[in-house]
């Protein structure tokens, strides 16, 4: 462990814990490594989503009812 790591108590569903232990053995990686990678991946996805939202914030908005009417008018519904 490096000096920057922090300990946390995490409660996993039994099936997830078993799957994580099996993957740990199969890949010769620690549970902590696997969890850190999974969390990092989830946070990276969130960051990507937020950047897309930020890039699209200037786009005009449309009320749902108007959108449905437009779909009908264009023969999509």
Image (cartoon, rainbow, N blue to C red):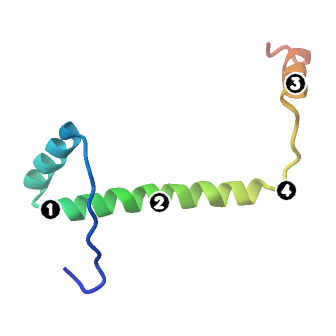
Task: Please tell me whether mark 2 sits on a helix, a strand or a loop.
Answer: helix
Does residue 39 sit above or below 6 in this rendering? above
Q: Measure how far apart labels 4 and 2 are at the Cα level.
A: 24 Å
Residue 77: give x, y in percent of width and height.
79, 13
Q: Earlier in the sequence, mark 3 or mark 1?
A: 1
Mark closest to the chain's N terminus, 4 or 3? 4
Answer with the quarter of the image where residue 9 lies. bottom left
The residue under label 1 is: 29
Name the disc covering residue 43, or none: 2
Q: Earlier in the sequence, mark 2 or mark 1?
A: 1
**Residue drawn 26% across the image and 50% down it:** 11
Which percent across, then down, holds residue 35? 28, 58
The residue singled out by tag 4 in the image is 58
4 or 2: tag closer to the N-terminus: 2
Q: Would you say 8 lies left or right of 18 here?
A: right
Q: Are marks 3 and 2 in contact (CB under 8 Å)?
A: no
Q: Secondary structure at mark 3?
A: helix
Distance between mark 4 and mark 3 Cα atoms: 21 Å
SS for callout 1: loop
Q: Is residue 49 left or right of residue 30?
A: right
């Amino acid at each position: 462990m490096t000096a920057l790591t922090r300990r946390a108590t995490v409660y996993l569903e039994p099936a997830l814990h078993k799957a994580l232990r099996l993957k740990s053995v199969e890949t010769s990686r620690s549970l902590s490594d696997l969890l850190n990678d999974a969390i990092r991946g989830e946070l990276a996805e969130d960051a990507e989503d937020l950047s897309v939202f930020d890039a699209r914030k200037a786009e005009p908005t449309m009320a749902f009812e108007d959108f449905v009417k437009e779909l009908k008018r264009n023969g999509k519904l």
